[in-house]
Amino acid sequence: MPNMKEDPMNSLRSVFDSVAQRTAGALEGTRGYVERAKLRSQLNDYYRRLGKAEYEAAMNGTSSMEEINMLMQRITDLRQQMYAMEQNAGAQRGGTVTCPTCGKLNSAEDAFCPGCGAQLR
């Protein structure tokens, strides 16, 4: 005859394991969101710096192309990182992708962004 105390304990363990897995998934999603937010903040900072460099160059009548090119390259790098993170997050959410050109959220089935026409795959 089976021990009646084992069955409820096994059921309880199963419930706790399920809750632990869901909690771990939620924490991972939150970590991803925070990392994407940090990256967006860095990207915005570089856009501001680029605008300031362009403004100062225009006002002073000097060329600061070296700085501007460096800032543009950093923005490009950050946008690619953001795109990769959004692609990964979209796959986890079940099929959304972010356009690397305009940032519009698109269906994973889209080959081109309906917002700007950029190729998504």
Image: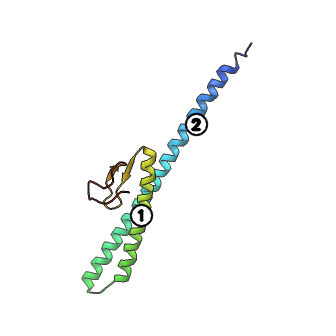
Q: Residue at x 62, y 24 (%)?
A: 11
Q: What is the spatial separation of the Cα atoms under label 1 and label 2, in whole angstroms?
A: 33 Å
Q: Is residue 40 left or right of residue 13?
A: left
**Color encoding of the figure:** rainbow
Name the quadrant of the C terminus.
Answer: bottom left
The disc label shown at residue 36, or none: none
Q: Which residue is mark 1?
A: 80
Q: How far across and how far down the image is residue 37, in percent?
A: 42, 56
Q: Which residue is mark 2?
A: 20
Is mark 1 in CB contact (under 8 Å) with mark 2?
no
Near-viewer residue (110 or 18) = 110
Near-viewer residue (63 or 89) = 89
Q: Is residue 92 left or right of residue 57?
A: right
Reply above or below: 41 against 70: above
Q: How far across and how far down the image is residue 94, in percent?
A: 42, 43
Q: Residue at x 36, y 54 (%)?
A: 98
Crowd band around label 2 with a 10 angstrom C-alpha radius: few (<14), some (14–19), many (20+): few
Q: Residue at x 33, y 69 (%)?
A: 48
Q: Quadrant of residue 23?
A: top right
Reply above or below: 62 against 38: below
Crowd band around label 1 with a 10 angstrom C-alpha radius: few (<14), some (14–19), many (20+): some
Q: Secondary structure at mark 2?
A: helix
